[in-house]
Image (cartoon, helix red, strand yellow):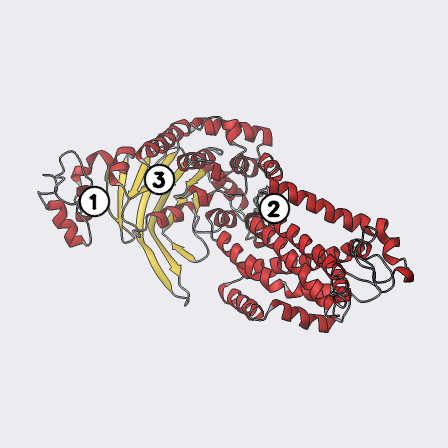
């Protein structure tokens, strides 16, 4: 990423912005030192002279050099701009992040208040606040800064809300990360690039606002001066000496352009904030972790019911009385249409459902750990090592602002207490196992630099960083072509053979499941309708299962007929029994 940023700096735009930033910094730091005497020295004999080589912008009514005064005014103008921008950004980040993590009702109230403030023109708010804090330089800085808070509040709230709904943020919360740590470690790093761009653009607007306030006499007051005051003084004789007004205007425009172009360069940067998992105890009592035999089921659920809370406070049940068991080393597939409860069942078994869900079960255990209650710190550590979750969309499951290597190391470093060098070596071995070439180089890359199949295999490698006993793969081959599907399934099989872990595979494709799994569970409408061995699908009795099998084309399928659909149970029965399906 550093190389990419250097290449950006070497472009014509990068070189121009770099020169502009250096000039502004030099004028801010050294301007009063080098030109302070010329800016304050009075020469009545040379008063109100026009532009010349000796005085590029002319002189004022007291004979002071206007070019020197413009250079000296850079410090006041730039510092006030940066101060006001800092107030706007800091206040906006606080308001936006708070609005994103608050409960629904409070979040709506905060967003409504921000919308009310945004309905007023920004400069009007600045004028209003300047009256409150007085017509001073500090008052103008506070006025412009507070007037910009609603703008950044809305921006940060929108960006944070989009990131807060990502899978990696949900996973961090479930692992015990508190709201503050989640916001600083996961949300803010991922909204930083657009925030930096808008901050730089806002700085140019703030600079113009300061000039406007000083031009109107509401900003910097005598004997201090900034570009706005110099513009006001020069406008009085613009027809006699145009450079007296154009000179400060040039400084305002060029500095504003530098700020705007700087934002585009900031957008190329990446912040690699370290990822830390926060483990917290939610209850005082502790439980001894049971010792589980390798012959006992890895996961077991009895009469599992999962409900979700609605906005009006009610409950809607989506999983109805599911009972299943997964033995060590067994590969179990759950197949069914969208909305059948496959993913919800798997997430409940893994304990990854959020606070809006209600999980009820006569028994729900993973290797002796009760998954219906909040796990202790020791149980959470063991769950982090012995469970592996492969989500449907790895691009949203992987943190886009952190390298793949950093995310792979997290499991071993946080849960396994493995030193960083050993965790790094284990990450290389895991990528080798899932057949990702050049793993040492790939560890330093970001998720978007991987292809779709490589991201899925990287997720499998992440599960291998612990000591997995159960790998849950939630439609890992969705939207992948058949060649990449085979690579992903082969990586899953290699992972299962190397660790002896059980696999729970979720898919819409009953043909894929039957060719990969030992046992197939068919779900519909939140219920298990049939369970049978993968090599005995012809023994299926339920109409829905037979309908799913009938929808899979084979070499004997009549290509002149459209593939059947399964709209209802009655139709499923008719499809399954139709002789035309296989002829």
Q: Nearer the viewer, residue 120 or 333?
A: 120
Mark in front: 1 vs 3: 1
| Secondary structure state at the residue bearing disc 2 | helix
Q: Is residue 232 above or below residue 336?
A: below
Residue under pointer 2: 266
Q: Is residue 461 left or right of residue 418?
A: left
Please state the total of marks drawn on the protein image: 3
Task: Give the percent coordinates (x, y) of residue 523.
Answer: 27, 48
Q: Which mark is residue 548?
A: 1
Q: Earlier in the sequence, mark 2 or mark 3?
A: 2
Q: Is residue 77 left or right of residue 531?
A: right
Q: Is residue 329 left or right of residue 136?
A: left
Q: Are marks 2 and 3 in contact (CB under 8 Å)?
A: no
Residue under pointer 3: 504
Q: Is residue 167 left or right of residue 337?
A: right
Circle 1 crowding by C-alpha within 10 Å: few under 14, some 14–19, many from 20: many
Mark in front: 2 vs 1: 2
Q: Is residue 271 above or below residue 158?
A: above
């Amino acid at each position: 990423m550093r190389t990419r940023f250097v290449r950006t700096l070497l472009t014509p735009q990068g070189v121009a912005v770099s020169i502009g930033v250096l000039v502004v910094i030099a004028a801010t730091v050294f301007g009063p030192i080098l030109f302070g005497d010329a800016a304050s020295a009075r020469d009545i004999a040379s008063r109100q002279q026009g532009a010349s080589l000796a005085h590029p912008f002319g002189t004022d009514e007291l004979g002071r050099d206007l070019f020197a005064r413009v250079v000296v005014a850079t410090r006041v103008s730039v510092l006030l701009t940066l101060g006001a921008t800092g107030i706007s950004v800091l206040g906006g980040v606080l308001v936006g992040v708070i609005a994103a993590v608050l409960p629904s009702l409070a979040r709506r109230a905060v967003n409504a208040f921000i919308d009310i403030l945004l309905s007023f023109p920004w400069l009007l708010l600045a004028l209003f606040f300047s009256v409150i804090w007085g017509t001073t330089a500090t008052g103008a800085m506070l006025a412009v800064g507070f007037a910009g808070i609603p703008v950044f509040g809305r921006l940060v709230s929108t960006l944070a809300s989009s990131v807060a709904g990502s899978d990696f943020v949900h996973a961090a919360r479930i692992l015990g990360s508190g709201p503050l740590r989640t916001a600083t470690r996961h949300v803010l790093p991922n909204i930083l690039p657009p925030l930096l761009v808008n901050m730089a653009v806002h700085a140019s607007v703030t600079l113009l606002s300061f000039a406007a306030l000083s031009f109107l006499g509401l900003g910097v007051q005598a004997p201090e001066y900034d570009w706005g005051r110099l513009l006001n003084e020069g406008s009085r004789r613009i027809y006699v000496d145009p450079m007296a007004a154009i000179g400060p205007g040039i400084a305002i425009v060029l500095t504003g352009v530098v700020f705007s172009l700087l934002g585009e360069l900031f957008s190329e940067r990446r912040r690699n904030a370290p990822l830390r998992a926060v483990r917290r105890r939610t209850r005082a009592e502790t439980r001894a972790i049971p010792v589980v035999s390798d012959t006992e089921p890895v996961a077991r659920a009895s009469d599992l019911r999962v409900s979700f809370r609605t906005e009006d406070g009610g409950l809607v049940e989506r999983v109805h009385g599911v009972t299943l068991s997964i033995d060590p080393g067994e590969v179990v597939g759950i197949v069914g249409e969208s909305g059948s409860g496959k993913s919800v069942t798997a997430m409940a078994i893994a304990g990854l459902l959020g606070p809006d869900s209600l999980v009820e079960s006569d028994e729900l255990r993973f290797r002796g750990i009760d998954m219906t209650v909040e796990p202790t710190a020791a149980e959470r550590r063991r769950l982090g090592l012995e469970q592996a979750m492969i989500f449907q969309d790895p691009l949203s499951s992987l943190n886009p602002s952190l390298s793949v290597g950093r995310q792979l190391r997290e499991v071993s470093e946080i849960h396994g207490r493995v030193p960083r060098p050993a965790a790094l070596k284990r990450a290389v071995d895991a990528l080798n196992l899932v057949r990702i070439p050049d793993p040492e180089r790939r560890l330093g890359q970001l998720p978007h630099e991987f292809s779709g199949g490589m991201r899925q295999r990287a997720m499998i490698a992440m599960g291998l960083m612990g000591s997995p006993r159960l790998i849950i793969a939630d439609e890992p081959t969705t939207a992948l072509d058949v060649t990449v599907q085979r690579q992903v399934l082969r990586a899953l099989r290699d992972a299962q053979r190397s660790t002896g872990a059980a696999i729970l595979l979720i898919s819409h494709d009953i043909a894929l499941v039957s060719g990969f799994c030992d046992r197939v569970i068919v779900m519909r409408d939140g219920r298990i309708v049939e369970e049978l061995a993968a090599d005995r699908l012809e023994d299926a009795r339920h109409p829905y299962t037979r309908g799913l099998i009938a929808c899979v084309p084979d070499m004997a399928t009549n290509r002149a007929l459209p593939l059947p659909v399964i709209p209802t149970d009655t139709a499923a029965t008719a499809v399954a029994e139709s002789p035309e399906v296989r002829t």
